[in-house]
Amino acid sequence: MRAIFKRITHTFIYVLDQDDALDSYVGKLGMVVDTDADLGFMRWLTVTLHERPDLALGLMLPRPPAYDDAT
């Protein structure tokens, strides 16, 4: 079976402080919170634009294995 991708719905950036990033993206850039969920082992935090609610930006904390104390 061949997968057909029609659009990107989520993209992610690493932030060092999710609360500061949330203040910036919502308070200064006018985005809105889409999801803010505590999953226990991580916080799933996404924001969207008013005019593009189908495109979510994930504000993710860098965690191993992609990021560790050495880097």
Image: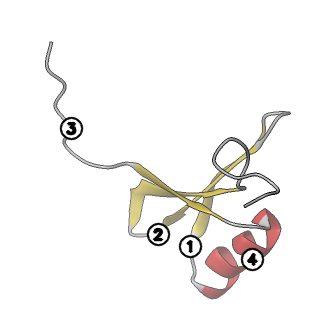
Looking at the rendered image, the disc whose residue lies closer to the viewer, 2 or 1, is 1
The residues tagged by marks 2 and 4 sit, at their Cα atoms, a distance apart of 16 Å
Query: Three-letter amino acid code at disc 1?
Result: Met
Query: How far across and how far down the image is residue 70, in percent?
Result: 79, 58
Residue 71 is situated, as x and y percent measured from the top left of the image, at 72, 61
Label placed on residue 50: 2
Q: Residues within 10 Å of mark 2 (few under 14, many from 20)?
A: few
Percent coordinates x, y for residue 45 in the rendering: 67, 52
Q: Mark 1: few, some, or many residues within 10 Å (few <14, many ≥20)?
A: many
Q: Name the quadrant containing residue 21.
A: bottom right
- Give the color scheme: rainbow, by chain, secondary structure or one colour: secondary structure
Q: Which residue is mark 3?
A: 5
Check disc 2 and give the amino acid type. Answer: His
Q: 10 Å neighbourhood of mark 3: few (<14), some, or many (≥20)?
A: few
Separation of residues labelled 1 and 3 (CA atoms): 25 Å
> What mark, if any, has residue 31 been given in the picture?
1
Name the residue at the top extreme.
1
Asked whether the beta carbons under mark 2 and mark 3 sit within 8 Å of each other, the answer is no
How far apart marks 2 and 3 lie (CA) works out to: 24 Å
Q: Are marks 3 and 4 in contact (CB under 8 Å)?
A: no
Label 3 and label 4: CA atoms lie apart by 32 Å
Identify the mark nearer the N-term, 4 or 1. 4
Q: Secondary structure at mark 2?
A: loop
Specify which label sits upstream in the sequence, 1 or 3. Answer: 3
